[in-house]
Amino acid sequence: MAVLSAEGVAFEVTVPVVIIGAGACGCVAALAAHERGAEVLVLERDPVPRGSTALSGGQIPAAGTHIQQKAGIPDTAEILEADLLHKAKDQCDHEIAHHIAKESARTIDWLAENHGLPLSCIDSFLYAGHSQPHMHATPTRSGAELLDEILGAVARAGIDILTSAHVTDLYADAQGLIHGIGYTRPDGSRETLGCGALILACNGYGGNKALLRKYMPEIAEAHYHGHVGNQGDAIIWGEALGASLKDLTAFQGHGSLCTPHMIHLGWAAFGDGGFQVNALGLRFSNETEGYSEQALKILRQPGGVAWAIWDRRCDTVAEEIENHRQARAAGAIKDCATVAEIAAYIGCDVATLQQTMDDVAAITRGEKACPFGRQFADFPPLAPTYCCAKLTGALFHTQGGLEVDTTGRVLRPDRSRFPNLFAGGGAARGLSGPSDWGYLSGSGLLMATNLGRLAGEAAADLVTPGR
Ligand SMILES: Cc1cc2nc3c(=O)[nH]c(=O)nc-3n(C[C@H](O)[C@H](O)[C@H](O)COP(=O)(O)OP(=O)(O)OC[C@H]3O[C@@H](n4cnc5c(N)ncnc54)[C@H](O)[C@@H]3O)c2cc1C
C-alpha cells in the first residue's frame, strides 16, 4: 500500500468517479454518482463482492422514513441524533451525527422507492440505545440479502464492478489531488487507472492484526468476525497523504457470538429479559448497555466465555433475525427444561445458578435492585422452556478512520479538504467516540449507506462540468 507521485504518470484510461470497495458504501456511492450523471467504476479485491456488509445483520437505522410513517412509528431525525450522541457520550463529531441523522430517511426512501430494495422497519423490539424502532432491513434481516439487493440495483443501473482488482497504490500530486490508482490482478499483473474523483469505500482495519495490536490491544487477539480483506488500506493511504485520522482506538465488539459455532444470537434474546452468566453461574454485567461493550466484559470472565440464558418468549422475538435462526439450526442453542439442566450444560454449581435465576426473577418483580443497574421490569420473569448458549466476545469492525466533512470529503488536520478524495463507511471515522462503548446499534450501515450516498453525489458534482 503506497501513495506514489503522479508526476509524469500518464493513464491510458480515466474514469470520472472511481470507487474502491464493493460493500454497502461503495455500491450505494456508485448508485448515487451514476444517478447524478457521472460515469463510475467500482474496484473490488474479491472475486465476488461480499465485504463485512454480507456478513452483517443488514439492519440500517433511519428516522422519519416513509416506511416508518406508514407503520405509525413517530420517529424523527432529532431522536436518532440524540440517540447517537447519548450512546457516544457526546464524544463523536456532532456535525456529522446531525447531518447523517437528517439524511437517513432520504437514503432509505431512495433505496426502497428508486432502487426497489424490499425494506421494512423492525418494530418488534428496541435495540439498546434506540428510543424508537430505527432499524430497517430486507425480509430475512440479513446482510447477505441486503448486499444482494444492492448489487441487483447496481447491475440494473448498468454500473460496472471490476472484481479481483486489489488496489494497492494511489497516485497523488503535491496538492493531494488524486490522479489515479494502481491495482493488481490475481495473476500478479499490475494495471493503472486515472480518476476524476476517488471514493475510499474499503472499510477499516479489522483484518489487520498489526494495526489492531497498535490501536486496540484489548481486543486484538479476539476472534474477528468481519471481512478479512479489510486491511486498513484507507487509513494507510490517508496517513501517507497527511489526512486527519480520528478515533483509531474505537471499535464495535459483540457480546453474543456463540462458540465454537461463531454465529451471533439475535440481541432481542437479551433486550427482552435474557441475561448472561459466567462459568461460575454468576451474572457479571448489565447486558443491555450495548452489545459492543459486552464483548470485553465476556472476554474478562474466566476462560473468556459466558453463557446466555433466555426463554421461548424471548426466543420468538429473536428468531426474527436470520443469524439467530442460523444459530439454532447449527445446534448452538440448547433448550433446557430445568435450571439443573442449564447448570449441567454450563458445568457450574446448581445452587449458585438457581440463586442467580431467583435474583433476576426478584429484580424483574421489583423486589430487588440489579447490582449492575439493569432494568428488567418491562418483562415477565423467565419461564421454562429455557434457552442457553455458550458465548465469547468478538471484534466486529473498527470505528476509527479518515475524518470527513458532511459530503464525505476527506479532511486534513487543519480541516482543509483534499481536492478530490472522499471516504465513507468503515473507511471514515465512525460515530462511536474513542472506545467500544459508543457504538449505537446499526451505526455501521448508517455510515456506509449515508456517507456512500453523500460522497457519491458530491464526487459526481465535482467531476461534472458546470456543477
Ligand atoms: C457480523 C457483523 C454483523 C453486523 N451487523 C450490522 C448491522 O446489522 N447493522 C449495521 O449497521 N452494521 C452492522 N455491522 C457493521 C457493518 O457490516 C459495516 O459497518 C458495513 O458493512 C461497512 O460497509 P463498508 O461498505 O464500509 O465495508 P464492507 O462491506 O466491508 O466493504 C468493503 C469492501 O472493500 C473491499 N476492499 C478492501 N480493501 C480493498 C482494496 N485495497 N482494493 C479493492 N477492494 C478492497 C473489501 O473486499 C470489501 O468488499 C456488522 C458487522 C459484522 C462483522
Image (tube, helix red, strand yellow):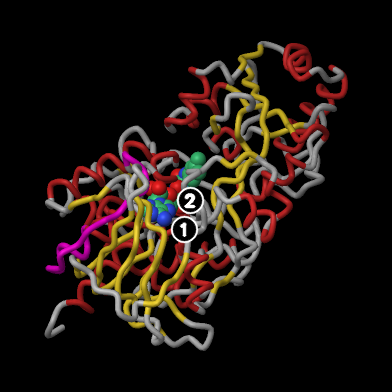
Q: Which residue is rendered at x = 40% and y = 45% of the image?
A: 51
Residue 132 shows in the view: no
Where residue 126 sits in the image (x, y, percent)? 50, 46
Inspect the magenta stretch and tell me whether residue 37 lies in it.
yes
Q: Based on the displayed image, in which of its 4 quarters is residue 463 positioned?
A: bottom left
Inspect the magenta stretch and tell me whether residue 131 lies in it.
no
Q: Does residue 269 sit above or below 428 in this rendering?
A: above
> Does 123 sit left or right of 291 as displayed?
left
Where residue 168 sits in the image (x, y, percent)? 41, 59
Q: Nearer the viewer, residue 44 or 261?
A: 44
The residue under label 2 is 230
The answer to the question of whether label 2 and label 1 lie on touching residues, with beta carbons closer than 8 A, is: yes
Where residue 429 sits in the image (x, y, percent)? 51, 67
Q: Does residue 101 sit above or below 332 in this rendering?
A: below
Range of residues picked out in magenta = 31-48
Is label 1 in a helix, a strand or a loop? helix
Q: Nearer the viewer, residue 315 or 369?
A: 315
Q: Which residue is rendered at x = 41% and y = 77% of the image?
A: 405
Q: Which residue is rendered at x = 77% and y = 13% of the image?
A: 344
> Does 403 sit left or right of 386 as displayed?
left
The residue under label 1 is 426
Crowding around mark 1 (Cα neighbors within 10 Å: few <14, some 14 to 19, many 20+) is many
Which amino acid type is shown beneath numbered disc 1? Gly
Which amino acid type is shown beneath numbered disc 2? Asn
Q: Based on the displayed image, in which of its 4 quarters is residue 382 positioned?
A: top right
**Quadrant (top left, top right, bottom left, bottom right) of the C terminus:** bottom left
Q: Nearer the viewer, residue 285 or 434?
A: 434
> Does 301 sit left or right of 228 as displayed?
right
